[in-house]
């Protein structure tokens, strides 16, 4: 089985290294030139809380994809959600006829993938682990393999065995569940993301520090509540993720609070920065439209407002436009809603 990772930042490189150490045939495809060269020279260094692993890997620049000839059986997609379409088009010519594209991303990019390679070759996925990367070739993985959690699922429940194939591969990187309703599972992750990713980035502090600031936890929960209502409005159900069980799924408002609590309690360290803050620190665009913006869009179609998410989107827009600096001084502005 030939496997590719398209996007080998903190999450992609860490998971790809797990699969490589398990003896699988893995190719890294990456758009950061210095990162590719560092992996070629030294391998990928993954720093866990308990130990460090250095793994030799096969790493390619994006421009080298056109030189490949052998098809891939499974492609794990870990680029930013807003980069999904071009990344899938890039790899589509190298996807085996019965190959699968697995979107290990935030947001609802599952539809973008399916529109390009077809529903039968699309596997949706949910990931919960904390990692960061600020130096080429080095991943700071804050979640051990034993504590990392994934859910995978086919868009068509009749193709469950294809999701189970991905499960068998991905379990080298953590606990993997098969979801019979992956769209709903992805919405649940978005519920948690809506509260945590952007608000803490606006304040320019680690997630745990943001939660301790007066009023911020409550603001985050309100963002999550709106996202849970958007999930239901979009036709999805409230389903268990992060290893929770059916009896732990409550109403939209309480479940939104519980999901955020799971992230804070099990998947965050004191210095964990959200992916949006990491992107802004690197001068990159964050996944704002794909998370909080989607909540506003979906509820807007039903005539319902999403004031907390809309306010979050507006402040993020100002930061990315350069008219507002991310800073703890934005606390009053964030809560000014």
Image (spheres, rainbow, N blue to C red):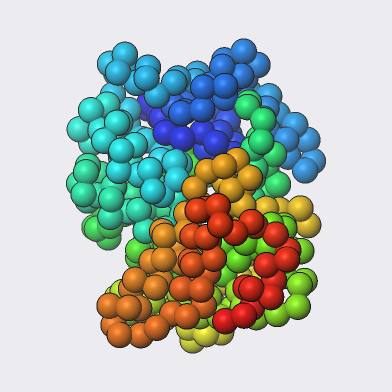
In this orientation, which residue lies closer to the viewer: 242 or 203?
203
Figure quadrant of residue 207: bottom right
Residue under the point 45% across and 20% down: 60
Q: How many marks?
A: 0
- Vertical side of 138 occupied by 337: above or below: below
- Vertical side of 100 occupied by 223: above or below: below
Q: Name the quarter where the N terminus is drawn.
A: top left
Q: Estimate the x, y position of residue 158 in percent, counting from the top left.
A: 24, 57
Q: Estimate the x, y position of residue 9 in percent, counting from the top left.
A: 55, 36
Q: Is residue 148 visible?
A: no
Figure quadrant of residue 76: top left
- Vertical side of 40 occupied by 95: above or below: below
- Vertical side of 70 occupied by 88: above or below: below
Q: Is residue 291 visible?
A: yes
In this orientation, which residue lies closer to the viewer: 77 or 313?
313
Residue under the point 35% across and 85% down: 304
In this orientation, which residue lies closer to the viewer: 32 or 44?
32
Judge from the rendering whether residue 232 lies leftward or rightward of residue 118; answer left or right: right
Q: Estimate the x, y position of residue 48 in percent, counting from the top left.
A: 73, 39
Judge from the rendering whether residue 109 lies leftward or rightward of residue 10; answer left or right: left
Figure quadrant of residue 39: top right
Q: Estimate the x, y position of residue 219 in percent, counting from the top left.
A: 61, 78
Residue under the point 45% across and 45% down: 80
Residue occupying the far front of the picture: 323
Residue under the point 37% across and 58% down: 108
């Amino acid at each position: 089985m030939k496997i590719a990772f398209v996007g080998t930042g903190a999450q992609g490189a860490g998971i790809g290294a797990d699969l490589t150490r398990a003896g699988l045939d893995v190719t890294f495809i990456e758009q950061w030139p210095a990162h590719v060269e560092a992996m070629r020279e030294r391998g990928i260094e993954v720093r866990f809380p308990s130990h460090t692993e250095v793994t030799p890997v096969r790493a390619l620049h994006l421009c080298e994809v056109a030189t490949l000839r052998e098809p891939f059986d499974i492609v794990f997609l870990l680029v930013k959600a807003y980069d999904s379409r071009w990344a899938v088009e890039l790899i589509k010519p190298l996807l085996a006829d019965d190959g699968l594209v697995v979107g290990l991303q935030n947001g609802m990019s599952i539809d973008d993938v399916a529109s390009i390679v077809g529903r039968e070759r699309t596997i949706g996925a949910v990931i919960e682990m904390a990692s960061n990367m600020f130096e080429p070739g080095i991943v700071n993985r804050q979640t051990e393999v034993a504590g990392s959690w994934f859910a995978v699922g086919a868009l068509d429940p009749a193709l469950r065995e294809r999701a189970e194939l991905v499960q068998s591969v991905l379990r080298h990187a953590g606990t993997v569940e098969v979801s019979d309703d992956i769209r709903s599972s992805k919405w649940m992750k978005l519920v948690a993301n809506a509260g945590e990713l952007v608000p803490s980035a606006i304040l320019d502090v680690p997630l745990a520090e943001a939660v301790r600031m007066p009023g911020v936890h409550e603001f985050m929960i309100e963002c999550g509540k709106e996202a849970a209502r958007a999930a239901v409005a979009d036709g999805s159900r409230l389903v268990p993720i992060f290893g929770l069980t059916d009896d732990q799924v409550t109403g939209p408002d309480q479940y939104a609070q519980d999901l955020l609590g799971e992230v804070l309690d099990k998947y965050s360290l004191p210095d964990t920065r959200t992916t949006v803050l990491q992107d802004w620190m690197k001068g990159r665009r964050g996944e704002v439209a794909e998370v909080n913006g989607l909540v506003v869009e979906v509820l807007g179609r039903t005539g319902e407002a999403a004031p907390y998410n809309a306010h979050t989107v507006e402040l993020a827009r100002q930061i990315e436009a350069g008219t507002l600096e991310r800073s703890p001084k934005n606390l009053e502005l964030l809560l000014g809603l």
